[in-house]
Image: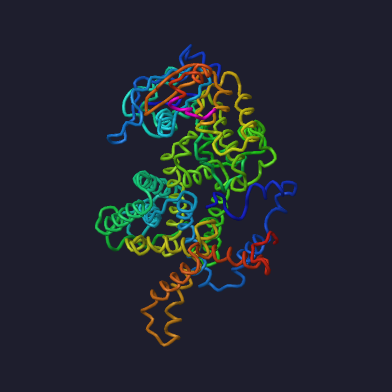
Amino acid sequence: MTTVLEERGSISERLGATGTANALELTGVSKLFGALAALSDINLVVRPSERRAVLGSNGAGKTTLFNCVTGDFPASTGTIRFFGEDITQFPPHERIRRGLRRTYQISLLFTGLSVLDNIYLASTGVSRSRFSFLRPRRDDALMASAENLVRVVHLEDVQHAEVSTLSYGQQRQLEIAMALAGAPRFILFDEPAAGLSPTERTELIEILLGLPQHMGFIIIEHDMDVALRVSESVTMMHNGRIFKEGSPAEIEDDPEVQALYLGGDDG
Amino acid sequence: MAVVDPFETRADAAAREDRSWLERIPAAYWVVGLVLLIMPAIAGDFVLFQIFGWTFILGLIALGLMFLGGYGGMVSLAQMSIAGMGGYMVAIFGVSAIDTISLGWPWYIAVPISLIIAMIFGTLTGWLAVRTEGIYTIMITLAIAAAFFYFTRQNYVIFNGFSGFNGVLPPMLFGVDWRGPAAFYYLTLFWAALGYFVVLYISRAPFGLALQGVRDNPRRMSALGFNVTAHRVAAYTFASLLAAIGGILLTWQSAQISPGTAAIGAAIDILVIAVIGGLRHPVGPFIGALIYVILKTYAIDALVAMGLSGERFQLLVGVTFLIIVFWSPDGILGLWDKFRESRNRDPLTGRGGEGP
């Protein structure tokens, strides 16, 4: 690995350095599990502030796509560029330190820790204090940003509660807060609305729409209400391939898409 | 499994934030601290030097294993070898009766060098071991422990082979003979207490929190930007420091170091100590060490008193270990938790209460 960790500057500095590069650029990405092609020849371009929904039936390769981008599973072929930089060979933590974030379909939280500690831990991961043997002081900057994020995802009432005592919906909100920690540049949301009640979904949409304008994301979502309201472009996947791309209205009206994915469902 | 130590959560800490730090020290610490401090006034020389001195040393070495195992989820059998390395180095660089090998450097050079070499050895061990998980970590560290034992026994140029080094004494600092029972008691108590509080402190610092995160969910941790491998190796380095301090004290206590000090049996004993005490809290290894040392010291007398042959003292050690693990896989700490829980249980509903 020839990566040297750069000093992390402000978002605008880094955007300046990378010019007008796309946030994410996938060229010919495939992922094979033995003989099974979970992804084949994916070409995808997402602009820095773009909000994109990825739709598709179960097994279409949506989560595998995320796993290849974050490096949880390395891609079998193809290249992945993040703000112009080729990250195909990077281990996951190097990609995260460059400003990529993701949430997981099944919450991967530290259930024995408090809400605040979970977010604090997420902030230290991309900072130099991750090896610190000293406890955070009360005026610690990372702790302050964690407290701020608690408010962003509407969890201030339970910030000192142990995560295991949180409701499912609150855990999903915490999952989002952890993805927002440490100045992300681009976020991958993997079915954030799964299992949420209608009220919680409304709250989720509020949180997503309330993110800073420059922060682009890709969202995998089965709930068309959520997906189409928070995104400006849509990518349809089917059997590990990109099937169709377009605006939410185009996708909704496309007869092929309706036959394949929406079916009889009035979405 | 809870990520934090069961005795304190941030919520507790927040609730007690208003009080001064002195008031926040639990009563148990005052009692135990006072008893330990005045121990030389009540206990005899043998108890001070042999029972408590040895308990603190073995507890310190096992504390490193508790840190690795309890917070990091990595069980290493090489802790005793790293302690042995520390002991050997202080004999080689410092003063011993084997003056053909020992360099005779003053303690303030020999001790830091010994600690550094032992930490490098421990870091390399960790660097190899973190590539494996679970039982394979145990196997690879056991292999390293075995290799260290046979190497020291067969190498005469540096390690003086079978007989090792004798006459390795602590320095006469401030005009005190640090091998005197009371002085040695305080010396080992100081390092054991320091190790205990440092481990407790680190468990809530970013490094410790992240280590517990790595234990529970390595994939998530790398998705937060943590280099999981580097974090695990760093945990080995820290555990090696604890082992190395323990190893040097152990060498000073017996005034000698030989291959037997870090033999396979001794390596496994450290694991036994950590497990019978409990891996969930840094006090566990010291409880385990006290039980182990008392058994090792008095088992022969107990067996002879029962009319049995004293040679079978290992049987008593083993049976006690089995009983503790059978009743509580979490060791003595687990038993204590069970007891507290049953006391708080509502007699009608059978459910655990919130009360004190």
Position of B26 compared to A112: left or right? right
Task: Tell whether position B108 is magenta.
Answer: no
- The residue shown at (55%, 48%) is B203
Compared to B115, does A201 lie above or below? Answer: above
A183 relative to B57, above or below: above
Residue A123 in view, yes or no: no
Residue A261 relative to residue A196: left or right: left
**Depth order, front residue of B42/A193:** A193
Q: Residue furthest right?
A: B18
> Which of the 4 quarters of the picture holds residue B283?
bottom right
**Color theme of the render:** rainbow
Q: Left or right: where does residue A190 sit relative to residue B132? A: right
Residue bounds of the magenta highlight = A259-267
Q: Position of residue B130 (x, y in %)?
A: 38, 45
Horizontal and vertical percent position of residue B333? 55, 63
In which quarter of the view is residue A75 placed?
top left
Identified at 56% across, 39% down, the residue is A195
Q: Nearer the viewer, residue A203 or B39?
A: A203
In what quadrant of the picture does the C terminus of chain B appear? bottom right
Task: Return the residue nearer the eye: A222 or B203.
Answer: A222
> Which of the 4 image quadrants contains residue A209?
top right
Q: Residue at x 53, y 45 (%)?
A: B208
